[in-house]
Image (cartoon, rainbow, N blue to C red):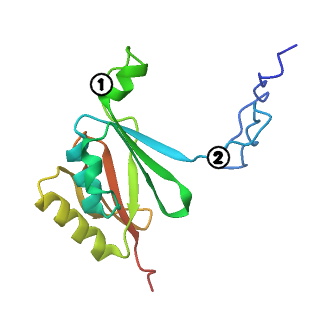
Amino acid sequence: MLPSYQVRPPARPSETFKTPAAPAASVLPMKLQLALIELVVADMAATLAFYRRIGLDIPPDADKEPHVDVELAGGLRLAFDTEDTIRSFDPEWSRPAGGHRAALAFACDNPAAVDAAYADLTGAGYEGHLAPWDAFWGMRYAVVHDPDGTPVDLFAPQPAGP
């Protein structure tokens, strides 16, 4: 018999294109709520300047702090911690290698706003990763990198066609 925290996989995998997969069983007796997304940064001031330019309300005196936490619409928070802060409680921590581990996506008001945001950010010297394009899933999309290389997606739905 399996311990109560282990869930036996289904006898055969679901063909997701034909039938929906069974909901994943929770191993926790409580419901957890996503409340905070944390980014580890090399240069707090440079990173906060980028996110201010995107439109986040971050106080100017936060630039010298080792940890900054801002509330987003809906109550979700975005936190920034310096690499030294992380190493203070996790001395084995090192930067990920070989690509990004997370990305953030910011909704724009319309497709033209995607192009304008991309132009503004790249014009300010931030790295443009993917110039604006019309994605097959019905969005205008672009990707820039923040100062630590984290991909930041800019998107807006395309107007409905005729």
Circle 2: residue type: Gln
Category of crowding for the residue at label 1, using alpha-carbon neighbours closer than 10 angstroms: few (below 14), some (14–19), many (at least 20): few
Circle 1: residue type: Ala
What label does residue 97 carry, if any?
A: 1
Asked if residue 112 lies left or right of residue 81, the reply is: left
Q: Is residue 135 above or below residue 64?
A: below
- Closer to the camera, 73 or 137? 73
Q: Is residue 68 above or below residue 60?
A: above
Q: Is residue 125 above or below residue 150?
A: below
Looking at the rendered image, the quarter that the N terminus falls into is top right
Labels 1 and 2: the sequence-earlier one: 2
Label 2 element class: loop
Q: Is residue 20 above or below residue 148?
A: below
Q: Position of residue 18 (x, y in %)?
A: 70, 49
Asked if residue 74 lies left or right of residue 102, the reply is: right
The residue at 29%/68% (across/down) is: 114
Looking at the rendered image, the quarter that the C terminus falls into is bottom left
The residue at 36%/21% (across/down) is: 87
Q: Position of residue 49 (x, y in %)?
A: 22, 53
What label does residue 49 carry, if any?
A: none
Q: Position of residue 103 (x, y in %)?
A: 38, 45
The residue at 22%/63% (across/down) is: 118
Q: Position of residue 64 (x, y in %)?
A: 25, 42
What label does residue 33 carry, if any?
A: 2
Q: Nearer the viewer, mark 1 or mark 2?
A: 2
Where on the picture, by quarter, is residue 39? top left
Q: Is residue 107 visible?
A: yes
